[in-house]
Amino acid sequence: MASGAGWSRTQRDVVGAAFLGWTLDAFDYFLVVFVLNSLPQEFGASDREVSEALFWTLAMRPVGALLFGRLADHFGRRPALMLSVVLYSATELGTAGVHSLFGFLLLRALFGVGMGGVWGVGASLAFESVPASKRGFVSGLLQAGYPTGYLLASVAYWLLIDHIGWRGMFVLGAAPALLVLFIRSRVPESSAWESTRATHGARNLWTALSGHWRLAIYAILLMACFNFFSHGTQDLYPKFLQKQREFGKDTVSFIAIVYNIGAICGGLTFGTLSNRIGRRYAIALAAILSLLTLPFWAYASTPLLLAATSFVMQFLVQGAWGVVPAHLNELAPAALRATFPGVVYQLGNLIASRNSVLQTAIAERHGTVLHPDYAYALTWVAGVVAILLALMALFGPERRDIRFDDAAVRETS
């Protein structure tokens, strides 16, 4: 396919399936973020005990990344992607009927397993189906699925929470199961996986990682910074708006919609830009620029200022993230392309999985239990990790435009 030419139907379907898988996954995840205030009374628990649900979801994502990544490297990207979507949809439906804190936490942990499988498998399927010249845009598009899911959750919360309650929101969250029908009927298996399997076989994980341990450790630490960057600016932001700024549902939803539009724009912008200036420089640029926005984003007091500054902040946070899918897939060993990106991403996520609990504790320590200072906690966590992320990116490796499989991803003039 010539550079700049239109997409083929197959490429549109594959990229669309990967995008929707991550979008609907994020939609289900962020439903919890919006209903957190309703759950302590429901389960007779404290805010901190209920916030453990976010931890368990994030903590179990590496398990899903490893499980579904290995299934994808052994049996194909397509069946592994379908199974992961079925799992997270089923656990979302189960959450709607739970009546105890233990059951709620258990189902959110199982949801994390399904969620952990979608990103790595979907990304490998997409990048093995498009030419190198398209990777930056596709990277930004795929990562934009995360704020798109957040945006959909914001709209659903705004329009439906008063009518269907928090349990009804989780029934709605089971809808992604329908995506499996689309994948089954329209998405072909990756021909790059077919040739890789023929060349490398279904290798043992430790054998395939031989000689790549330093790269794996670097990638895990890089993704820990990335996950603190995103979760540190997103997970407690609605609660900050609700409890510290004392905004109502409509105002919180409006601000969340605005900053998720910014996030989508940022992912597409920096993902595409990374094809021109390189993956490392695009990540570092977004992280450094976020430091300039930080004090206005956390300490503005009016809805319009908070909407404007949160738009810019998430434009930059998800701008940096827009480079990640392409960057990790290009760094990955060929025999582990479905496993490596997902596992290092989710292990980094595991390191950052206590973020919501950590930020809540910082906010309570700096303020009080009844009046936590979320602005302080948001500022310090986001500021520190932005600096670390810029340094990690600048001094790390890059393999921009490396060929995956000449037979599967070919550009013709």
Image (tube, rainbow, N blue to C red):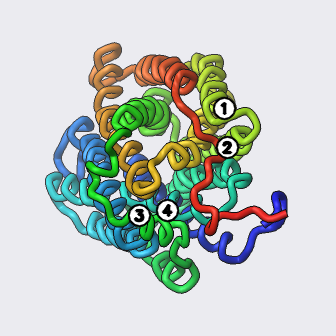
Which residue is the extreme one toward the top? 366
Q: Of callouts 1 and 3, which one flags the residue occurring earlier in the amino acid sequence?
A: 3
Question: What residue sits 66% from the left and 62% below the top?
Answer: 130
Residues 193 and 309: in front is 193
Alpha-carbon span between mark 3 and mark 2: 32 Å
Mark 2 or mark 4: whose residue is earlier in sequence: 4
The numbered mark, 3 or 4, whose residue comes first in the sequence reads 4
Q: Residues within 10 Å of mark 4 (few under 14, many from 20)?
A: many
Q: Disc 2 versus disc 4: distance between alpha carbons?
A: 17 Å
Circle 3 SS class: helix
Q: Label 1: which residue?
A: 282
Quadrant of the image containing the C terminus? bottom right
Viewer can see residue 38 = no
- Percent from the top left, x then y, of residue 403? 62, 53
Q: Under tag 2, what secondary structure?
A: helix
Which mark is nearer the camera, 1 or 3?
Answer: 1
Residue 352 on image: x %, y %:
35, 34
Q: Residue at x 35, y 22 (%)?
A: 372
Give the Cα distance between marks 1 and 4: 23 Å
Q: Amino acid at mark 2?
A: Gly
Q: Which mark is residue 122?
A: 4
Label 2 near label 1: C-beta < 8 Å? yes
Determine the residue located farthest toward the bottom in the rendered image: 185
Q: Is residue 86 left or right of residue 188?
A: left
Separation of residues labelled 1 and 3 (CA atoms): 37 Å
Residue for badge 2: 271
235 to the left or right of 158: left
Considering depth in this image, is 260 or 139 the residue closer to the camera?
139
Count of numbered tags: 4
Q: Amino acid at mark 4?
A: Gly
Q: Where residue 159 appears, x then y in whole percent?
A: 55, 60
